[in-house]
Image: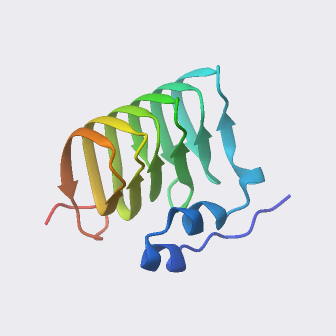
């Protein structure tokens, strides 16, 4: 089975989480379900949906537009490297997203560092360093 290439143009213009996460069929997402714990490095080409616990790194493969989404009640301690990130659970670590949209929902509790190009927060509890990056390769800081 081959998957369709992902496009994010509309979502980037609208900064709309629903558009971002429904661009790719959720049946292609890798899931870490509630009650599950994953430790280590997790690489995805199609997307990652976290309802459980992750200790380690979640990364979109190079040249991938794979989104990473955490749910209320989830926990991630480590790093997320993805062009589209939506946080709704607990997060402690580094989010590195120099090209896309990072959304932090009202149910999120975030500690650490968020490196972003576009950021939207809906009332989350943030104890973070927010670092705006440009769209240059490697996401160099302005």
Q: Is residue 109 above or below residue 15?
A: above
Residue that appears at 64% across and 21% down: 36
In this view, which residue lies farthest toward the left?
A: 142
Q: What residue is rendered at 64% in x and 68% in y?
A: 23
The answer to whether one can see residue 70 in this image is yes
The answer to whether residue 82 is seen in the rendering is no
Count of marks placed on residues: 0
**Image location (x, y in percent) of residue 17:** 51, 62
Q: Is residue 34 left or right of residue 67?
A: right
The part of the image, by quadrant, that contains residue 4 is bottom right
* Quarter-of-image position of residue 48: top right
In this view, 74 is above or below 47? above
Compared across the picture, whether 93 is left or right of 81 comes to left
**Residue drawn at point x = 55 percent, y = 35 percent:** 42
Image coloring type: rainbow
- Locate residue 73 relative to residue 49 in the image: left or right: left
Q: Residue furthest right?
A: 1
142 horizontally vs 21: left or right: left
Q: Nearer the viewer, residue 128 or 107?
A: 107
Please name whichever residue, 55 or 41, is drawn nearer the observer in this view of the structure: 55
Q: Position of residue 108 (x, y in %)?
A: 40, 39
Residue 19, image x and y in percent? 58, 69
**Quarter-of-image position of residue 64:** bottom right
Q: Give the answer, above or below, for where 11 lies relative to 56.
A: below
Q: Which residue is drawn at the image coordinates 47% and 51% (left, top)?
A: 86
Residue 75 horizontal/vertical position (percent): 47, 27
Image quadrant where one finds the N terminus = bottom right
Question: Which quadrant: the C terminus?
Answer: bottom left
């Amino acid at each position: 089975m081959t998957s369709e290439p992902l496009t994010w143009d509309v979502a980037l213009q609208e900064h709309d989480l629903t558009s971002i996460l429904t661009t790719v069929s959720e049946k292609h997402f890798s899931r870490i379900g509630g009650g599950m714990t994953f430790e280590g490095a997790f690489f995805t080409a199609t997307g990652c949906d976290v309802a459980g616990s992750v200790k380690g790194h979640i990364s979109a493969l190079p040249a991938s537009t794979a989104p990473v989404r955490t749910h209320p009640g989830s926990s991630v301690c480590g790093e997320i490297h993805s062009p589209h990130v939506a946080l709704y659970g607990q997060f402690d670590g580094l989010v590195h997203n120099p090209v896309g949209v990072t959304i932090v929902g009202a149910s999120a509790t975030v500690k650490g560092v968020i490196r972003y190009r576009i950021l939207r927060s809906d009332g989350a509890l943030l104890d973070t360093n927010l670092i705006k990056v440009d769209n240059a390769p490697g996401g160099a800081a302005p």
